[in-house]
């Protein structure tokens, strides 16, 4: 007997899911379906994306709703438009052989009148993103008084995106006695709080270990100098010619830059981030889904809800600021029982982050060596041989051209022809990897002092500190550690005088002990960075002090242009880095003499620890 029938799913549904290849239940389906079919419990399911969650709640819903009625009986809230559409589509597929099932997908960025029309026609299941749902509720266009089930899917993501209040407002429209089913990949305290607030004694289910990534994911990291990151990344990609990957960056700008660099270097890649219009994003996603794109370069927010199967690699070009995001990122691979690899490119200072991640996901990371140029070349060669061996020859089509082809190659021996065909694809790698340097660096323990600073997390109290603004930020390739070093070196103060550093895209806020503020203004007088005048101002937005104006302290003429000795040195060292590398196809070959940021890999006090997850939700929404 079909195992889904045994679980209590009706024949029509089993027929439909068999047609889409569901032969036996996934772990979460096997465990959740019997509980949810009773309809009498609230439910919390801790499960990654890709584990079959949609059917785990979708199939029980189909068993319990009354499709002879045409009013909303189930509401599914999820974080993104993509996920919303996917869930609605899946439910429709599951319900293919049940009559009168009406599902509506309600999400922002699309025409609201179509959605309202569908609701008016009558629906039993509403799948929605919170913002648009509230909009529709505000128009009194929906009646939730008969809702029996609310599903909160990817609850952690919804909270991450700042939907807490919206969710509260939406839930207050639904009856007290409804059942709430919550699914989440991770269980930060905010999700726990929601569970406590809206549920009574929920049935809890964890698939895999708590907070643990999918067991089928291999976690690897490569230790490289910051300035060699892009070159190392390319080697990894080149030694995996069949890669179908998602590359995660921290900011929109980084995402765009890397995608552009890759395209310029001949790779099949494109960017996905929040500055693109919905239409552009859909287009990129379609190309990726159709496998016309080999690599998708994405920010965390833009990649939410990506549900493409068979992703072979997730590459963390930059580690996420928030530790929870690592699980979300790596969960984009190894979906539906497949295996996958999650790779992180880190510099020396980020080793402590790997240790933190190991603790959180309960799995160890394997350090891998960036392959040598020769190994990459060999891998490419074998791939070409393989491709030639396996190419499908269309005899009929090619035969008509054979006489011309044979004539064209008449003067060449077989060996010559083989050599030339291989060279067509191969030359770019031979040239690129000629004399390529070793990009690996030795791991070293982070010193005790450093670790103390790394782990202390954001400062709560800013008493005794002045918050300053600087017109340089992560766009200028600063990490927090870089910034700390830059400030200390330039102002000639110690790291102890610096409080919280809030590194933004094109600017940074940092706290300095009140008594050291003048030194900062003095030190930065006339300083240029990569030809740009560095501007320091007292931040108007600082809290708790009445005497902070927007006028700089003691810095009357700090705007002088002259390049100081110090600035020359620092600016010069930084000027290579990523952009130098990418403009230069041969950059990898000449890593040693490129004049890149020689201190890029180990300067400053580092960004060691992850940001405090709980305190930063709204911020991540605006940053990406
Ligand atoms: P989900 O976690 O619901 O997004 O599902 C992840 C992927 O697994 C989707 O492509 C589903 O179609 C597929 N899937 C879910 N359940 C099963 C199953 N029992 N057998 C085979 N594939 C499944």
Image (cartoon, rainbow, N blue to C red):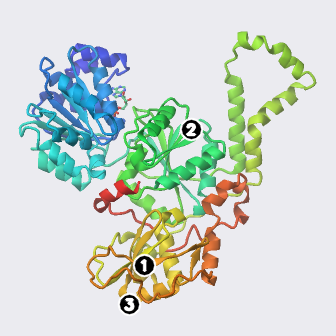
Place residue 1 in its image quadrant: top left
> Foreground: 182 or 256?
256
- Mark toward the start of the polypeptide (2 vs 1): 2
- Mark toward the start of the polypeptide (3 vs 1): 3
Q: Ligand 1: which quarter?
A: top left
Q: Are marks 2 and 1 in contact (CB under 8 Å)?
A: no
Residue 341 image point, x, y percent: 49, 43
Q: Residue furthest right?
A: 411
Q: Does ligand 1 reach within 8 Å of label 1's beta carbon?
A: no
User: Which residue is located at x 41 percent, y 39 percent?
Assistant: 278
> Foreground: 409 or 538?
538
Residue 100 image point, x, y percent: 20, 16
Residue 225 in sight here: no
User: Which residue is located at x 56 percent, y 38 percent?
Assistant: 243
The number of numbered badges drawn on the structure is 3
Residue 63 in sight here: yes
Place residue 30 in its image quadrant: top left
User: Which residue is located at x 30 percent, y 52 percent?
Assistant: 160
Left or right of 260 in this view: 400: right
| Secondary element at tag 1 | strand
Name the residue beneath numbered marker 1: 537
Q: Nearer the viewer, mark 2 or mark 1?
A: 1
Name the residue beneath numbered marker 2: 243
Label at residue 515? 3
């Amino acid at each position: 007997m079909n195992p889904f029938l045994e679980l209590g799913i009706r024949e029509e549904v089993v027929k439909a899911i068999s047609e889409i290849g569901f032969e036996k239940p996934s772990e979460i389906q096997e465990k959740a379906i019997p509980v949810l079919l009773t309809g009498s419990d609230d439910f919390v399911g801790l499960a990654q994306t890709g584990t079959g969650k949609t059917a785990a709640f979708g199939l029980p819903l189909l068993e319990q709703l009354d499709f002879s009625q045409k009013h909303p009986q189930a509401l599914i809230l999820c974080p993104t438009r993509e996920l919303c559409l996917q869930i609605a589509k899946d439910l429709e597929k599951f319900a293919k052989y049940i009559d009168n099932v009406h599902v509506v997908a309600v999400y922002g960025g699309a025409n609201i009148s179509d959605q309202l029309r569908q609701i008016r026609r009558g629906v039993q299941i509403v799948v929605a993103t919170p913002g648009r749902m509230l909009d529709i509720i505000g128009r009194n266009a929906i009646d939730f008084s008969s809702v029996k089930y609310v599903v909160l899917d990817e609850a952690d993501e919804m909270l991450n995106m700042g939907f807490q209040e919206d969710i509260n407002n939406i839930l207050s429209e639904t009856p007290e006695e409804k059942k709430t089913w919550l699914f989440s990949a991770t269980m930060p305290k905010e999700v726990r709080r929601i569970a406590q607030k809206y549920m009574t004694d929920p049935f809890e289910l964890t698939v895999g270990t708590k907070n643990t990534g999918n067991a089928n994911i291999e976690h690897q990291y490569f230790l490289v100098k910051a300035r060699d990151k892009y070159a190392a990344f390319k080697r990894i990609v080149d030694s995996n010619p069949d890669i179908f990957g998602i590359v995660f960056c921290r900011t929109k700008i980084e995402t765009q830059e890397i995608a552009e660099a890759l395209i310029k270097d001949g790779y099949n890649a494109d960017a996905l981030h929040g500055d693109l219009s919905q239409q552009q994003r859909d287009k990129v996603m379609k190309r990726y889904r159709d496998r016309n794109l080999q690599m998708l370069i994405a920010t965390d927010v833009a990649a939410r809800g990506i549900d493409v199967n068979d992703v072979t690699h997730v590459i963390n070009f930059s580690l996420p600021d928030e530790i929870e995001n690592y699980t979300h990122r790596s969960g984009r691979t190894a979906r539906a029982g497949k295996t996958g690899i999650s790779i992180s490119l880190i510099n020396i200072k980020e080793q402590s982050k790997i240790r933190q991640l190991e603790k959180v996901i309960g799995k160890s990371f394997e350090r891998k060596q960036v392959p040598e140029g020769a190994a990459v070349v060999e891998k490419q060669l074998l791939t070409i041989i393989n491709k030639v061996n396996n190419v499908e020859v269309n005899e009929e089509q090619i035969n008509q051209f054979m006489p011309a082809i044979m004539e064209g190659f008449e003067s060449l021996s077989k060996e010559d022809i083989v050599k030339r065909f291989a060279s067509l694809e191969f030359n770019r790698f031979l040239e690129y990897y000629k004399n390529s340097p070793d990009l690996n660096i030795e791991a070293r323990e982070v010193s005790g002092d450093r670790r103390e600073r790394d782990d202390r997390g954001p400062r709560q109290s800013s008493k005794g500190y002045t918050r300053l603004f600087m017109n340089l930020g992560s766009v200028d390739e600063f990490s927090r550690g870089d910034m700390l070093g830059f400030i200390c070196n330039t102002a000639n103060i110690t790291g102890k005088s610096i409080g919280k550093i809030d590194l933004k895209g094109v600017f940074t806020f940092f706290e300095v002990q009140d008594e050291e503020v003048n030194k900062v203004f003095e030190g930065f007088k006339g300083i240029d960075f990569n030809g740009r005048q560095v501007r320091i101002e007292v931040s108007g937005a600082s809290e708790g002090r009445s005497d902070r104006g927007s006028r700089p302290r003691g810095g009357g003429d700090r705007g002088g242009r002259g390049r100081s000795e110090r600035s020359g040195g620092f600016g010069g060292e930084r000027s290579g880095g990523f952009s130098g590398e990418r403009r230069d196809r041969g950059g990898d070959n000449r890593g040693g003499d490129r004049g890149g940021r020689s201190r890029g890999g180990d300067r400053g006090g580092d960004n060691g620890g992850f940001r405090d997850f709980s305190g930063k939700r709204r911020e991540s929404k605006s940053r990406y």
